[in-house]
Image (cartoon, rainbow, N blue to C red):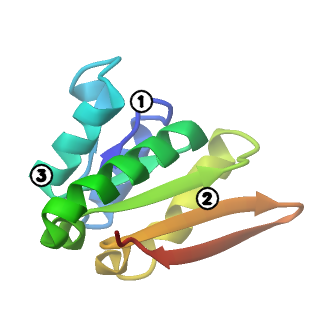
Amino acid sequence: MLIDEGLPRALARLAKAHGIDAVSVLDIERGLPNHRLAEIALTEKRVVVTRDRRFYRTIRDWLKSRARRDPQALRSIGIVAILNPRGLRDIKEMFYEVIKPPSAMLYSHITWVERVDDHIEMKREKLDC
């Protein structure tokens, strides 16, 4: 996993505690352009985790355009969007919902985890061009 800089480093540690290879963008370099983060995720075969709707859309569109040239590229990447959290504890709870199922289900998919009133909803969509 590649944890976006808008999320705490603690998510990378939480993922690692569950056997998932994860790195925070904060440990790579702050302020990397979105396309560079997408390239890192693609090269390192990582699922991108973000709470930034604009970044999520940018990376989704970039990956889809890249996949038109290389359809196999989408098999080794995914996107997780954590939406409407109420704070750090909520972010961790929502992230745990994502990593609880087999993490292989995250590849080739966009996963949305959203706080709706008093519960968490999760949706998945196939990432294709």
The label shown at residue 44 is 3
Residue 92 horizontal side relative to residue 55, left or right: right
Q: Which amino acid does label 1 sit on?
A: Glu
**Image marks 1 and 2: residues in contact by CB distance under 8 Å:** no
Mark 1 vs mark 2: give the one in front.
Answer: 1
Residue 103 in the image: state x and y as whole percent.
Answer: 33, 74
Query: Which mark sits nearer the N-terminus, 3 or 2?
Result: 3
Q: Distance between the residues labelled 3 and 1?
A: 17 Å
Residue 112 is left or right of residue 38, and the answer is: right
x then y, percent, for residue 118 = 87, 64
Q: Can residue 21 be seen in this view?
A: no
How far apart, in angstroms, are the residues tagged by discs 1 and 2?
A: 18 Å
Q: Front-most of 127 and 11?
A: 127
* Residue topped by disc 2: 93
Residue 75 picture location, percent across and down: 21, 73
Crowding at label 2, few (<14), some or many (≥20) Cα neighbours within 10 Å? few
The kind of residue tagged 3 is: Glu
Q: Relative to the observer, which residue lies in front, 16 or 46?
A: 46
Q: Which of marks 3 and 2 is in front?
A: 3
Amino acid type assigned to the residue bearing label 2 in the image? Glu
In the image, what residue occupies the spot 59% across and 43% down? 53
Q: Name the residue under label 1.
A: 5
Provide the secondary structure element on which disc 2 rests. helix
